[in-house]
Image: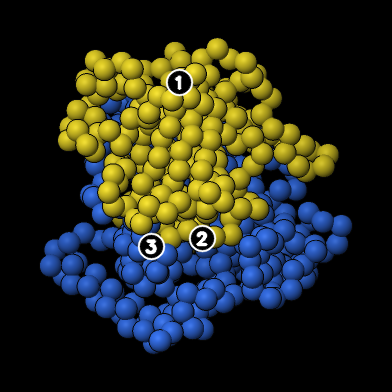
Chain colours: A yellow, B blue
Amino acid sequence: MTKIDTSRPETVLPTPSHTVGPFYGHALPFPGGGDIAPVGHPDTIALQGYVLDGEGKPLPDAFVELWGPDPDGDLPQVDGSMRRDPAGGGFLGRNGVEFTGWGRIQTDVNGHWTARTLRPGARGQSAPYLSVCVFARGLLVHLFTRIYLPGDDAALAADPLLSQLPEARRDTLIARADGDGTYRFDIRLQGEGETVFLEFR
Amino acid sequence: MALTQHDIDQEIAAEHAAYEKRVADGGPVEHHPRRDYAPYRSSLLRHPKQPLVAIDVARDPELVELASPAFGERDITEIDNDLTRQHTGEPIGERITVSGRLLDRGGRPIRGQLIEIWQANSAGRYAHRREQHDAPLDPNFTGVGRTLTDDSGCYTFTTVQPGPYPWRQHLNAWRPAHIHFSLFGTAFTQRLVTQMYFPNDPLFPYDPIIQSVTDDAARQRLVATYDHSLSVPEFSMGYHWDIVLDGPNATWLEEGR
């Protein structure tokens, strides 16, 4: 039955997850999905990486969603990530001024993704990070991970998540600085160098 | 030798029996599929082998994942939730109205959040360039919809009944008719992508994707209910499907759960 009786909490049970399948490409990705940073913002960083399977092969049919705070650590509640044109029905793109904090990026045929967003600020007890959610054909439940940026070793050492991980695994969550504000972050779904994935309780 | 439906049926039965045994031995009810569900072959190289690392959200209310991105009227157009009106002509197929509520684990409505859907046309063909099934494309149907939930957490889509389609994982593999749903909650932890099915589909037992939900009651929650009160006179058949997002949100913290 799929009419949920909200007066009886024991009947409010979660709707199961399913794979996105292979044919979401005309539905979910949108132009400028990875152009999260307002145009010309001085705290802009560029991110890029591959999504790889258990044999190290890149996934041409995955997408990632990034969600993170602004440089002050504030999480925006601003809509307009996928602004639409009420006349033609197409996408207008972001307005280039407001920061929504969220983006969706499909991997290309090489399994490569890129994004430009703002350098996240710190919140709570954590070192600054971006939340990442990974979806793909073959993935029955999406996977959460995080992108931490290198540089502030004291903040990274004090982070409640990173500090509980063995060093080799911890490093899968820290992007590599490639200079000029560009960072590399590969997501390995399985096998050697498997990325740390998270569950929230 | 080519993989047959019989091979997959046996694997599905073995996975189901293994789950029943886990529960009989005191294991928890599994509301979601396991990511390593071999009858769905694409999962084999795409699931982590290391256990997920647990984060107790009660320890830090400032976690990024406890907030969710915002969507608004700018992100949709007026006819986005009517998939029959997006082209100059009418799509072919049985018109349907799909409606329900978006809820959190406490049964509370999730208001003003984005729901995205996508589906095959009435012949079982996606308007996606890489789709190779030779059923006809419908020039009047893209099969993509979006809406925002209202103040009661309700959503409604008007579309056509999608067709089942073959997908070549094994010989004579067919997907039951379904609509894909993508959902956001009040926390990013509640993010969900899933599929809605139609009642009494004879393909359910053969499909390793729906069977990846090995709990019988959980699997039923993926199937919409025919609702005559939602059927629109002289127009469409009505289906009701409530969606419950899993994962902790800020309300959990407030209630000290």
**Relative to residue B235, is residue B254 drawn left or right?**
left
**Residue B17 at least partly seen:** yes
- Measure the alpha-carbon separation of dots 3 and 2: 11 Å
Chain letter of the residue beneath label 2 in the structure image: A
- Measure the alpha-carbon separation of dots 2 and 1: 36 Å
- Measure the alpha-carbon separation of dots 3 and 1: 36 Å
Given this view, does label 3 or label 1 mark the residue nearer the observer? 1
Kindly identify which residue carries mark 3: B43
Quarter occupied by the C terminus of chain B: top left
In front: B165, or B108? B165
Kindly identify which residue carries mark 1: A179
10 Å crowding of disc 3: few (<14), some (14-19), many (20+): many
Image point 34% across, 77% down: which residue? B12
Q: Which mark is residue A21?
A: 2
In front: A17, or B136? B136
Image point 51% across, 84% down: which residue? B172
Query: For numbered disc 1, what is the local secondary structure?
Result: loop
Residue B52 appears at what percent x and percent y? 26, 46
